[in-house]
C-alpha cells in the first residue's frame, strides 16, 4: 500500500477503529507492519476522530486524510516497506541514525510511460550486469540502492535489491536498460571491477559475491564523503596520501596540491553534503558526555570507556583489522579473508555520527562492503547491540587515550577476562 492508500484506509475505517470494533489482526498487512515498527496507531486514530465530519462531507474527509498523511510523512521510521531484521543489525536506533544522515529521497518522478506505469528514479550500484546474449526481455540487472528511497510515502532502506523489489511489486515497472544512465565519474573503477572479477589470478575470481569482492579492490566512491570524513584529516590526506585500504590494487596519486587548493577541496566535500567545516565538534571526547555514560554503563571499577575498549579488543574486530597493537593475521588462505583498514587512525579520519551508522549496519552505507554486522557481546554493556554500537564508536573516537591508559589488551569473552594482547585469538570470519 502507498501512504495515500494507508491514509484512505484509516479514514474509511475510522468509526470501527475509534470504537475498537476492528481487531488488529483484521488490519491490512502494511498497517500491522507499522505496529511492529512501533507506530502508536492510536495517534492516527485520534486524528480521524472528528464527529463533525460525516461520510458525505468530502472536504472534511480530505482534511482527515491530509492529517494522517502529514503524520506519516513526519515519522518515516514507521513507514518502512519491510520489517526490521535485528539479526542483521537493524534496530530502531540505527534507523533513526540512518534517516538523519541519509534522509529519504523521493523516487517517484511524476512521469509515466505510455502504458501509464509510473517511472521511479534511484541511484544504484550495478552488482550483476545482464547476459547480453539473452533476449532483452529476459535480461536481469542487479542493482543495490545507495539511497534511502521514498516510494509513494513508503521507505525503502539502502542496499535493497531494486530488481527484487520491482519484480515482487505489482505497482511499479521493471528495470529497463534504455532508462539507465551511468554514474558521474567512476567509469574506470567499474571497468576494473569487471576485469578483476574475471581475472583468474584475482582474489575476486570465481568467488560467491566476486563483484562485491572486486569493489573492495578499486578506488572507493566519494558518495557522501562530506558527512563521512573529518575535514582536517581530508586536507592532510589530499596533501600527502597514504595507504588506508589494504585490498586495493591502486594507490591514491599525489596531485601536488598547494595548501589553498587542498583546503578548498576538503571544504568542498563538506559543503556539498551540508556538513560542518572546516572543523568538527567531537562531543564523545568531552567529560560531560562520558560522565553521562558512566552513570548508567560503568561496571564496578571499570568505567564506560574501559568497557568499550574491552568490546573493541574482543575477538571479532581482530579477524579483519589491526587493532590495539595487535597485527592483522591473514591465516592459511589469504584469499578467504578481507583485510580491513587499521583502526589506529579512525579517531582522526571519520566523523562520529557516520561511524555510528557504519557500525549499525555497514551495508546501509556501502552496498558492496565485506564489513560484517558487529554482533552483540553478552558479557559487556548489558549485551545490548545498540548500546554496544555506540560503545564501539566511542572506543574508536578515544583510541589514543585508551591505548595509552588501558594498554594493548585482549578481552576473552569465554572467560570474561582481560589478557595480554599477545594472547589474542580472532573469531572466524566469512
Image (cartoon, grey):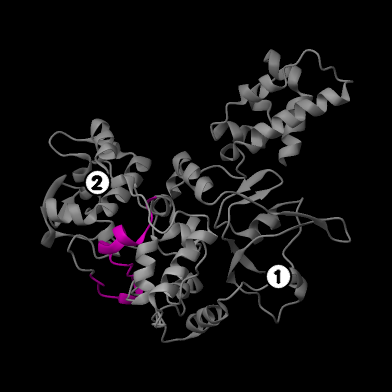
In this view, the residue in front, 74 or 272, is: 272
- Tag 1 residue: 180
Q: Horizontally, is 420 left or right of 359 in the view?
A: left
In the rendered image, the quadrant that contains the C terminus is bottom left
Q: In this view, does 260 lie above or below 12?
A: below
Measuring 21% from the left and 49% from the top, which residue is drawn there?
309
- Tag 2 residue: 308
> Which of the 4 quarters of the picture holds residue 257?
bottom left
Q: How many residues crowd mark 2 within 10 Å: few (<14), some (14–19), many (20+)?
A: many
Tell me residue 180's x, y (percent).
70, 70
At numbered mark 1, what does the secondary structure look like: helix, strand or loop?
loop
Q: How far apart are marks 2 and 1 (CA)?
A: 45 Å
Q: Is residue 255 above or below residue 94?
A: below
Tell me residue 76's x, y (percent).
60, 40
Tell me residue 188's x, y (percent).
54, 82
Residue 247 in view of the camera: no
In this view, the residue in front, 341 or 80, is: 341
In the rendered image, the quadrant that contains the N terminus is top right
Measuring 68% from the left and 29% from the top, which residue is drawn there?
27
Magenta-highlighted residues: 329-352
Residue 234 in view of the camera: yes
> Which of the 4 quarters of the picture holds residue 346?
bottom left
Residue 402 tag number = none
Amino acid at each position: 500500500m502507498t501512504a495515500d492508500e494507508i491514509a484512505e484506509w484509516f479514514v474509511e475505517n475510522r468509526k470501527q477503529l475509534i470504537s475498537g470494533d476492528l481487531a488488529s489482526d483484521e488490519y491490512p498487512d502494511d498497517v500491522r507492519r507499522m505496529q511492529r515498527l512501533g507506530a502508536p496507531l492510536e495517534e492516527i486514530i485520534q486524528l480521524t476522530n472528528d464527529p463533525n465530519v460525516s461520510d458525505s462531507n468530502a472536504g472534511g474527509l480530505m482534511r482527515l486524510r491530509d492529517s494522517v498523511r502529514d503524520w506519516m510523512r513526519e515519522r518515516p521510521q514507521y513507514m518502512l516497506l519491510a520489517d526490521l531484521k535485528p539479526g542483521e543489525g537493524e534496530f530502531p536506533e540505527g534507523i533513526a541514525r540512518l534517516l538523519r544522515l541519509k534522509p529519504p529521497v523521493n523516487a517517484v518522478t511524476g512521469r509515466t510511460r505510455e502504458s501509464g506505469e509510473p517511472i521511479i528514479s534511484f541511484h544504484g550500484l550495478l552488482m550483476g550486469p545482464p547476459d547480453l546474449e539473452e533476449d532483452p526481455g529476459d535480461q536481469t540487472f542487479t542493482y543495490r540502492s545507495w539511497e534511502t528511497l521514498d516510494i509513494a510515502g513508503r521507505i525503502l532502506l539502502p542496499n535493497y535489491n531494486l530488481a527484487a523489489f520491482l519484480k515482487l511489486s505489482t505497482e511499479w515497472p521493471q528495470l529497463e536498460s534504455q532508462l539507465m544512465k551511468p554514474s558521474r565519474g567512476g567509469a574506470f573503477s567499474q571497468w576494473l571491477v569487471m576485469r578483476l572479477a574475471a581475472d583468474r589470478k584475482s582474489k575476486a575470481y570465481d568467488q560467491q559475491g566476486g563483484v562485491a569482492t572486486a569493489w573492495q579492490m578499486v578506488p572507493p566512491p566519494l558518495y557522501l564523503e562530506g558527512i563521512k570524513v573529518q575535514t582536517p584529516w581530508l586536507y592532510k590526506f589530499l596533501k600527502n596520501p597514504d595507504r588506508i585500504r589494504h585490498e586495493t590494487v591502486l594507490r591514491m596519486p599525489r596531485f601536488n596540491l598547494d595548501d589553498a587548493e587542498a583546503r578548498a577541496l576538503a571544504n568542498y566535500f563538506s559543503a556539498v553534503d551540508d556538513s560542518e567545516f572546516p572543523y568538527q565538534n567531537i562531543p564523545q571526547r568531552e567529560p560531560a558526555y562520558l560522565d553521562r555514560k558512566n552513570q548508567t554503563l560503568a561496571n564496578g571499577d571499570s568505567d564506560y570507556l574501559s568497557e568499550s575498549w574491552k568490546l573493541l579488543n574482543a575477538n571479532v574486530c581482530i579477524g579483519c583489522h589491526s587493532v590495539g597493537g595487535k597485527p592483522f593475521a591473514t591465516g592459511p588462505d589469504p584469499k578467504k579473508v578481507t583485510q580491513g583498514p587499521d583502526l589506529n587512525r579512525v579517531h582522526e579520519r571519520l566523523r562520529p555520527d557516520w561511524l555510528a551508522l557504519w557500525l549499525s549496519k555497514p551495508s546501509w552505507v556501502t552496498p558492496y562492503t565485506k564489513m560484517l554486522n558487529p554482533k552483540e557481546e553478552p558479557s559487556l554493556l548489558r549485551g545490548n547491540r545498540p548500546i554496544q554500537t555506540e560503545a564501539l564508536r566511542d572506543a574508536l573516537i578515544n583510541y589514543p587515550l585508551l591505548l595509552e591508559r588501558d594498554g594493548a589488551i585482549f578481552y576473552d569473552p569465554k572467560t570474561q577476562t582481560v589478557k595480554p594482547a599477545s594472547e589474542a585469538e580472532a573469531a572466524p570470519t566469512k
